[in-house]
Image: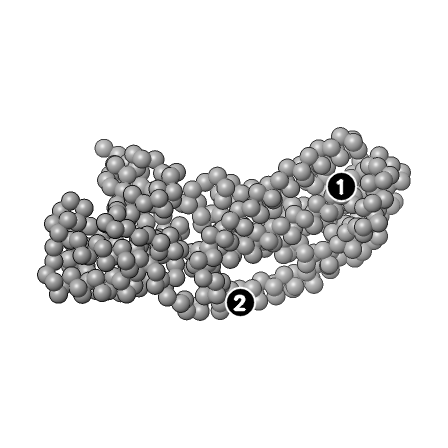
Amino acid sequence: MSAFSAPPDEYLQANPREGHLVWDRFIRVFHWSLVASVTIALISGLALDATWSRLHLVSGTFAVALVSARIVWGFTGPAYARFSGFVPSRQQVVAYLKRGTGHMRHLGHNPLGALMVLALLALILGLGATGLAALGSGLKTGPLAAILPASQGGVWSEIHETAALALLGLIVLHLGGVIFESRRSGENLPRAMITGRKARRMGDIAAPARTAHPIVAVLSVSGLLLVSALAVTDLSQRPLSNPPVAVIPPVYSAECAACHMAYHPATRPAASWQVMMTGLQDHFGEDASLPQETAAQISTWLRRHAADTTDSKPATLWAGLRDTTPVALPDTAQWKRLHDSVDADTFRRAPVYSRSNCVACHADAETGWFSPFRITLPKEPTP
């Protein structure tokens, strides 16, 4: 007996306790895998800090891949997996609500449950799309990095977070519906999603028999994965417009990085660099004066590659900095907001020692990217 088909009536009569196979093996694996991946994605995205970004990306991508495979199975799977077997019409939903839940029992999804399934699948795909847009615009990573400007990063991140909260709300409603329906029908629905079986009762509304086509499904999913991988690879390799400058001139390293980390020019707008370079005689309480020619050379390079000329998320954060006297980055509102969740003691102990020592936590700080995938919060060394 196939895992994709229901047992014949004579088998059910001889084995009444085994029930009717409603949820095939793929649906069951898909359901619990989606529960795990969505849970991890929501926790890592809403409750944890930026150091968990990679886990959030992996779990979110896996959830979208699962939903994509589920959509394919919705056209090639057995009766209760088929969209044609449970997607209700408006008339069916209205009739179900008018007659009440006590007058009928659907072996598969009832009309309200079907609408919830469709909403969850659509919202997860939407989260994948908005997450991809936030990744491409805000972090300049992925297939949309060369298409979307960094200035849109905040907008896409906000939409993505709002969609995540909406998904969380739907999950709560879904769990409430499962509990209500389990009590109303006297059947353990979560258990049915593990065993795949439900007891047959008089008057059950069953889906019309459909033959599953697993080979077609595997070929379709494989083709979808191949096309997606090729598209993502091609788009991700497109050159970025106005990325942070990659080459640091020796004069800057020799004069400025000799005393502290080499702050990338994209961490300040041109006007701010101009103020700083013209006030080196009082550089945060120290005399950092340079020969006029050297200062002019460094100043020109800094202003040419400043935040207001660079398309990256850090650059958009600092592009509006308009100080009349040099302001340390940790004293700006942007820096404080971004580091609000970090324990203050972290900045005082080894190996950080200072809020200005960006490279202690950001491995790519001197490149100007400050990617969340390159963040490591150092622990206090063992004596």
Residue named by callout 2: 231
Instruction: State the residue position of label 1.
Output: 197
- CA gap, disc 2 and disc 1: 40 Å
Q: Which residue is at the front of the view, 379 or 291? A: 291
Residue 303: tell me if it is visible. yes
Residue 340 is situated, as x and y percent measured from the top left of the image, at 38, 39
Quarter holding the C terminus is top left
Q: Residue 255: percent from the left, percent from the top?
A: 15, 57
Q: What percent of the width, then of the height, locates residue 274?
A: 23, 58
Residue most extreme to the front: 324
Residue 200 visible to the viewer = no
Foreground mark, 2 or 1, reads 2
Residue at 40%, 50% in the rendered image = 372
Q: Is residue 107 above or below residue 240?
A: above
Q: Secondary structure at mark 1?
A: strand
**Nearest to the observer: residue 155 or residue 89:** 155
Direction from residue 205 to residue 375 in the image, left or right: left
- Which disc is residue 178 wearing? none
Identify which amino acid the numbered label 2 is placed on.
Ala
Is 136 or 105 nearer to us in this picture? 136
The residue type indicated by label 1 comes to: Arg
What residue is at 42 percent from the left and 42 percent from the top? 49
Counting every numbered tag in the picture gives: 2
Write down the quadrant of residue 366 in the picture: bottom left
Instruction: Give the residue displayed 28% in from the left and 65% down from the top.
Output: 304
**Mark 2 residue element:** helix
Disc 2, disc 1: CB below 8 Å?
no
* Mark nearer the N terminus (2 vs 1): 1
User: Residue at horizontal 35%, vertical 56%?
Assistant: 319
